[in-house]
Amino acid sequence: MSKLDQSKTPLFSVLKEEYAGNNTLAFHVPGHKRGKGADEEFINFVGEGPFTIDVTIFPMVDGLHHPHGCIKEAQELAADAYDVKHSFFAVNGTSGAIQAMIMSVVNPGEKLLVPRNVHKSVSAGIILSGARPVYMNPEIDEELGIAHGVRPQTVAEMLAQDSEIKAVLIINPTYYGVATDIKKIAEIVHQYDIPLIVDEAHGPHLHFHEELPTSAVDVGADICSQSTHKILGALTQMSLLHVNSERVKVERVKEILSMLHTTSPSYPLMASLDCARRQIATQGRELLTKAISLAHYFREEANKIPGIYCFGEEIIGREGAFAFDPTKITFTAKELGFTGTELEDMLTADYHIQMELADFYHTLGLITIGDSKESIDRLLAALRDISNRFSNQGRKLTHQLLKMPEIPEQVLIPREAFYRTKTKISFEESIGKICGELIMAYPPGIPIIIPGERITREILDYIKDMKSAKLQLQGMEDSELITINIIEEK
């Protein structure tokens, strides 16, 4: 329950009323001078409003690096809305926030327990921090061909095996909206009195509706980042970083954020985050109820279309799938013979509908507080038309999910591997060498090998099998598998 007045927007109000409202004469950057020097076509399209509040740091509008006025108040309101101890505006998105979280809790050489299928920003955070990653595998849904969450039992086993682990990082929920039992994981992690870091990029809305999976901030995450722009109303790039435990030194977080943030943060973007917080705090349940209802409507109608399948709550109870966010709509047309990428391309080219992502089997979309029945019906109409066009053509995509090899030996930590010289050699002659590339398999979206790990015959054969099966490989510099980058051992 909020203690502060969530109808307030301190940063936006100062920009709108005190700065723009008083027609302040600008002799400061940016050079467009409240839009007067902006490109004519661009300002005609965007409008003058954003330019009038596009300012730099000065006392009236506060400063992100050492806030003491309206930005400080805006961040306090965000913390109050999410019922956490501290919240910070993350102007580099959740990618930058994740890097800051890792650097705030793990020192060079210390071990960090992470899922194998982490976002590249986690890998970047590991490189920047000098941490030594200890990898655990998420659960693979062989029927769907995607990775779910990490089981609590996996976390417990890994911590019991290695007393040197200093922190644990969990993804919750996944891109596909699948959540693990984050409360149980928090309880396990805290038995060792170490911090739980949560990448909740896809869960900024979870705290505000009881029909959604539990948010990590409500059940024990010590530090957590959320992409407010992904599902809520903030402009792209804006995220929040929450600190909710004494296990994390908040002054250290501030120091790291100041190192990573630009010294020229965008005030229009920060103002959009201020307003998005007000919106979700004051209208969140109503707006999310509508979005959830639209998602249920889409899923019910989509699953009536021949050749289309959109999974939903029926996956709850499978390994790694403790809860599910229905606003993520992931559907397949493999019964019509299309890969997820082909379906996405068709929706874009033929129907002017842009989806969020595609993997080999699926196309993923988001239903948010900005959707309407009209937008859902337009997508459904496109899927019905595709079904009508291709239902009787005898096409069918064969389901293939190859068993991944074991996680290979880590010879160098990612930071060491990043800075070492790479050498290109024959793919077939690389067995036993240290890999210099990150090679990813889709499905299920998990790295096969990471720079610094030793290449095995099993890994080479798996990569070749993936290519033969025409499944997606990402990260290889040479997609023909003739050469591979390796790191020479000293």
Image: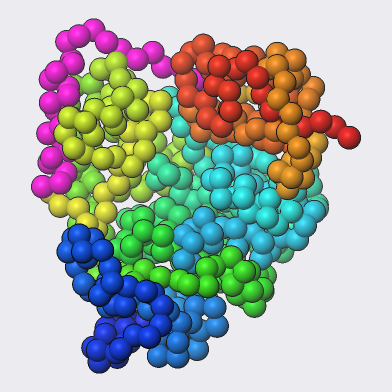
Q: Position of residue 168 (x, y in %)?
A: 65, 54
Q: Is residue 271 visible?
A: no
Above or below — where is 380 with respect to 288? Answer: above
At horizontal 15% and vertical 52% (from top left) the residue drawn is: 372
The residue located at (49%, 28%) in the rendering is: 442
Q: Residue 208 or 396: which is nearer the viewer?
A: 396
Quadrant assignment for the N terminus: bottom left
Q: Is residue 121 left or right of residue 414?
A: left
| Residue at the top extreme of this rendering | 394
345 relative position to 255: left or right: left
Q: Is 395 placed left or right of 482 in the picture?
A: left
Residue 216: percent from left, percent from top: 50, 60
* Residue at point 18%, 15% (across, down): 391
Q: Is residue 243 magenta?
A: no
What colour scheme governs how the chains and residues are painted in the rendered image of this protein? rainbow
Question: In terms of image quadrants, where is residue 22?
Answer: bottom left
Observer-nearest residue: 30 or 165? 30
Q: Position of residue 166 (x, y in %)?
A: 74, 57
Q: Nearer the viewer, residue 449 or 136?
A: 449
Rendered view: 313 above or below 359: below
Quarter containing the C terminus: top right
380 is within the stretch colored magenta = yes
* Residue 455 visible, this angle: yes
Q: How many marks?
A: 0
Residue farthest right in this picture: 490
Q: Which residues are magenta?
A: 374-403
Residue 145 in picture, x, y percent from top left: 45, 27
Quarter of the image where one finds residue 422: top right
Residue at (28, 29) in percent of width and height: 345
